[in-house]
Image (spheres, rainbow, N blue to C red):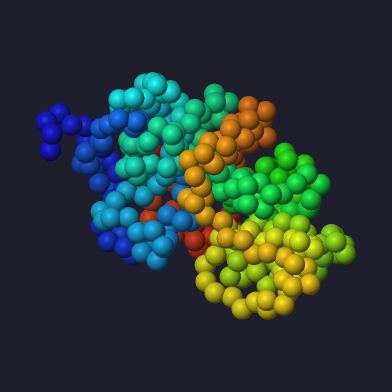
Amino acid sequence: MATGQKLMRAVRVFEFGGPEVLKLQSDVAAPIPKDFQVLIKVHACGVNPVETYIRSGTYSRKPLLPYTPGSDVAGVVEAVGGNVSAFKKGDRVFTTSTISGGYAEYALATDHTVYKLPEKLDFRQGAAIGIPYFTAYRALIHSARAKAGETVLVHGASGGVGIAACQIARAYGLKVLGTAGTEEGQKIVLQNGAHEVFNHREVNYIDKIKKFVGEKGIDVIIEMLANVNLSKDLNLLSYGGRVMVVGNRGTIEINPRDTMAKESSIIGVALYSSTKEEFQQFAAALQAGMEVGWLKPVIGPQYPLEKVAQAHQSIIQGSGATGKMILVL
């Protein structure tokens, strides 16, 4: 270890597995920024479902072990490496990606994945922007090419991506329907851009949606749990409608005939297929949302680093999301 190198607390994963493989260590060397890198003192870090898939070893992208999870941090710039002109020590920032991992007291990020955090948003809200808002924007505006006046159904609207999708859709002039599984979740969805909300735990909720939208159907469905809902989604779509698959946890049988008469599409969404230019485009749109005020993350459960295993357990097995899960440091 280099002399005088700062030590920090960080969550480390030495083997893939259940939440118990997340180990909090207090003697991890704090990273040092190189060219085009920014070191951030982390105040909060978002917890995203994808981090549980990566940790379990079942995801398409496997990090080299050991690693620290987490991509969405918010905090204050501690130091910058060479050739970094956009940021200086003391700036309030958030990220869409980290090099060293976000579940830690300090995180290293490449400068083009770091963004200024406006004063009107606190660090917890800053940590709720990354994956949720950039994914929702990619799904709705970039890939589905949703237009003002179209109808969107956010299927699972009370979590991080769902709330982001409702806020973006409303700001862009869409008719917004959402679903949630709890009363609190439904309330949050209505407060964040949805014109109408449905309870996806009710047996006949699909009939209620059909009745509400009438003959035309729904133009875009943002789908958080495709292995449960995809077949129902295909029956709800309008002519030329599209289902955007944002989340999925298993397999499902569908009848391809359901896509034929309507010439509908099923489109997968992966935020990390975005190019650097696309990220910059999404960031510009979202930055405008922060300035105007429609981008307002809703914070849900908050955990300290010590309870990270509990956070991972809860985000997958919880009884219905209400806002964005955050680790606070």
> Can I make out residue 267 in this image?
yes
Between 315 and 38, the one lying in front of the other is 38
**Does 295 appear above or below 314?**
above
Q: Residue furthest right?
A: 215
Residue 25 is situated, as x and y percent measured from the top left of the image, at 25, 46
Residue 222 coordinates in the image, percent (x, y): 65, 56
Q: Is residue 44 above or below residue 146?
A: above
Q: Position of residue 239 (x, y in %)?
A: 80, 63
Q: Is residue 69 above or below residue 204?
A: above
Quadrant of residue 179 in the image? bottom right
Quarter-of-image position of residue 258: bottom right
Q: Position of residue 91 (x, y in %)?
A: 43, 23
Front residue (pair 102, 253): 253
Q: In the figure, is residue 237 to the left or right of 302?
A: right
Q: Which quarter of the figure is the C terminus placed in? A: top left
Q: Which quadrant is home to the N terminus?
A: top left
Image height of 286 relative to 215, above or below: above
Q: Residue at x 31, y 63 (%)?
A: 16
Tag count in the figure? Answer: 0
Can see residue 184? no
Q: Residue at x 68, y 64 (%)?
A: 265
Residue at (54, 26) in percent of width and height: 118
